[in-house]
Image (tube, rainbow, N blue to C red):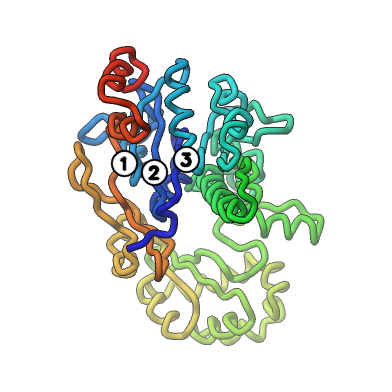
Amino acid sequence: MIRALEKLKVLDLTQVMAGPFCCQLLADLGAHVTKVEPVGKGDASRHAMGFRMKGEDNASFLAVNRGKESIAVDLKSRQGREIFHRLACDADVVVENFRPGVTKRLGVDYETLRELYPRLIYASISGFGQTGPYASRAGYDLIAQAMAGVMSVTGDPDGDPVKCGIPVGDLGAGLFATVGILAAYVAREETGAGQHIDCSLFESALALSVWETAELWSTGRIPQRFGSAHRLNAPYQALRTRDGHITIGANNQRLWERLCRTISRDDLLRDERFTDNTDRIRNREILIAELESALKGRTTDEWVAVLTEGGVPCGPIRNYKEVFDDPHTQAREMVIEMDHPVEGRIKGLGIPIKMSGTPGHVRSAAPLLGQHTDEILARAGYRAEEIAALRDKGIVG
């Protein structure tokens, strides 16, 4: 079956999360992705992060590098750079997430490659972008969340600021870079020219702050932490039940009325403190106390059944094991299995983009370091004796 991006050739110079996630998304949609890694050590996440499995590569590496080939090249050497340039001449996209300035020192920066290959699309992912006062700072999701305001609105109102449980700066940058690459690919069909895409963890985390900026610019108030609550709607949060919590999203007047009737609290509909959403936000603490006094009469599962039957959006709070045991998760094919040359049969997250005509496909598990070096070099025109000589010199691995 045809894959949406099967003609797209990508050189992945990235490490750890944001860049590898971007390139994995492209691979899932059919792109041919070649991961270019340092000889001997490879991507830092192979060994330095996460949980070790049977082989040398950590689970964190396997999670964001499936569907790729791996070639190990010493880009600090002249011959290594020559190899990269030969690969680039046949590529559509280069993705890198070095600190700004590193690619120029290596001779694989956008300006250098653009002169040689004007059609090349080049995506840079960094902590703070390629320009601006903070461009040279290290890029970490934690710091991006802190400086972009995300941590200031995450956590309980009376607690300390906390980071979002998933790395929204890293993953957001990977997603935005993917969108940029696809947009540049479409534009190239019209103009014939590639372009440079500049994405940062900081801006990605900031760009996701849509409700928070709406509050700031419309009211002048600095957004605060509300725990699981919504800053623009109430009730829209986690509420206590007899045995745990349930999330309820009664975020309009119709659903508010339906909620009150379903939990047998019609009296709340006549309470002037809760007349409309503005009143309910103003009196949120009192509102939640009233709702939880009713909800404590049943278990979470019982309330999910009752509220769902009553047309009130709700759901239990699940841990990840429960999520993947859920028949809906399985029906949507969000758990897949892959064969890895060392780990054997391993699980991975499914593809969340469902396409009817050109569906995504997981070509393979994450590669071993340099697993495809010989194969890639042979395709690039290197003879067997040349490859052997490069390996003897430590230029490739």
Q: Is residue 81 left or right of residue 340?
A: right
**Callout 1–callout 2 Cβ contact below 8 Å:** yes
Could you tell me the amino acid type at mark 2?
Val
Q: Position of residue 13 (x, y in %)?
A: 46, 33
Q: Quadrant of residue 353?
A: bottom left
Which of the labelled discs sits on residue 355, or is there none? none
Q: Does residue 172 appear anywhere in the picture?
A: no
Q: Which residue is mark 2?
A: 64
Point out the frontmost of discs 3 and 2.
Answer: 3
Question: Looking at the image, is 11 positioned above or below residue 263?
Answer: above
Q: Position of residue 386 (x, y in %)?
A: 31, 20
Q: Position of residue 307 (x, y in %)?
A: 45, 80
Category of crowding for the residue at label 1, using alpha-carbon neighbours closer than 10 angstroms: few (below 14), some (14–19), many (at least 20): many
Q: Does residue 318 appear anywhere in the picture?
A: yes
Q: Position of residue 324 (x, y in %)?
A: 31, 59
Could you tell me the amino acid type at mark 1?
Ala
Farthest residue, direction top: 393
Residue 69 or residue 100, whichever sits in front: 69
Which of the labelled discs sits on residue 91, or is there none? 3
Category of crowding for the residue at label 2, using alpha-carbon neighbours closer than 10 angstroms: few (below 14), some (14–19), many (at least 20): many
Q: Quadrant of residue 316?
A: bottom left
Could you tell me the amino acid type at mark 3?
Ala
- Comes first in the chain, label 3 or label 2: 2
Category of crowding for the residue at label 3, using alpha-carbon neighbours closer than 10 angstroms: few (below 14), some (14–19), many (at least 20): many
- Comes first in the chain, label 3 or label 1: 3
Q: Is residue 375 left or right of residue 228?
A: left
As helix, strand or loop, the secondary structure at mark 2 comes to loop
Q: Residue at x 63, y 68 (%)?
A: 286
Q: Which residue is mark 1?
A: 366
Q: Residue at x 57, y 68 (%)?
A: 236
Mark 3–mark 1 Cα distance, whole angstroms, equals 20 Å
Point out the frontmost of discs 3 and 1.
Answer: 3
